[in-house]
Amino acid sequence: MAIGERIHFFRTMRGMTQKYLGMALGFPEKSADVRLAQYENGSRTPKADVTAALAQALDVSPKALDVPDIDSYVGLMHTLFTLEDRYGLEVCECEDEVHLRVHIHKGRDAAELHRMLSAWGAIAAKLKAGEITKEEYDRWRYRYPELDTSGQWHKITPSQELSDMLLADLKEHSEE
């Protein structure tokens, strides 16, 4: 799916017109809808700064706009093959159902993917249990990893005490 299709998907999901979104990006009112139509139909590709602004206006991660080519079944299959090669994705059959799973012992990338999928599974379970709304679930997915609370993507910030201690130690060693 091309970036234009993703822009259209999220814009319509948010109930925005092309003109409204274009003006939110700072395009002149006269041409705002034309510019957005060009992005959506693929005749123009937004530059990185415009993509970042689109993501912010649509309340999604910029990565949600940049999706691999899955426009055809063959393209989707090759995407899955790439995931197999890179992340240890495996296909298996169980009780007449086909499943995809991550073989976590296939390396660091596979273990990372396993942790990310586990976080997704946890948030999906909350939706299924009625603990969160569909809107909250979608917001988590479309803002991933920003809203992930599994701890995988959180920045580690040292305490002020630890920071002061490291700084003092650094100064002491630089004076020697």
Image: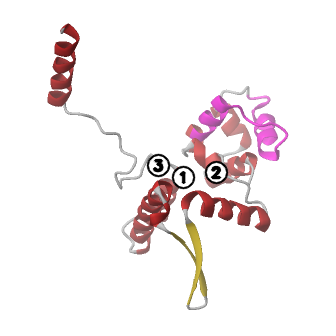
Rendered position, 23 above or below 95: above
Left or right of residue 114, residue 158 in this image: left
Residue occupying the far bottom of the picture = 95
Q: Disc 3 marks which residue?
A: 145
Q: Disc 1 marks which residue?
A: 142
Q: Disc 2 marks which residue?
A: 10
Viewer-closest of 129 and 123: 123
How far from the left and from the top, in percent, is residue 101?
Answer: 53, 72
How far from the left and from the top, in percent, is residue 149?
Answer: 36, 53
Residue at image point 81% right, 39% down: 38
Rendered position, 149 above or below 166: below
Few, some or many residues within 10 Å of mark 3 (<14, 14–19, 20+): some
Q: Which residues are magenta?
A: 29-55
Viewer-closest of 110 and 73: 110
Picture disc at residue 117 = none
User: Is residue 1 rendered magenta in the image?
Assistant: no
Query: Residues under labels 2 and 1: Cα distance?
Result: 9 Å
Residue 133 visible in the snapshot:
no
In primary-sequence order, the first of circles 2 and 3 is 2
Left or right of residue 149, residue 28 in this image: right
Identify which amino acid the numbered label 2 is placed on: Phe
Query: Residues under labels 2 and 3: Cα distance?
Result: 17 Å
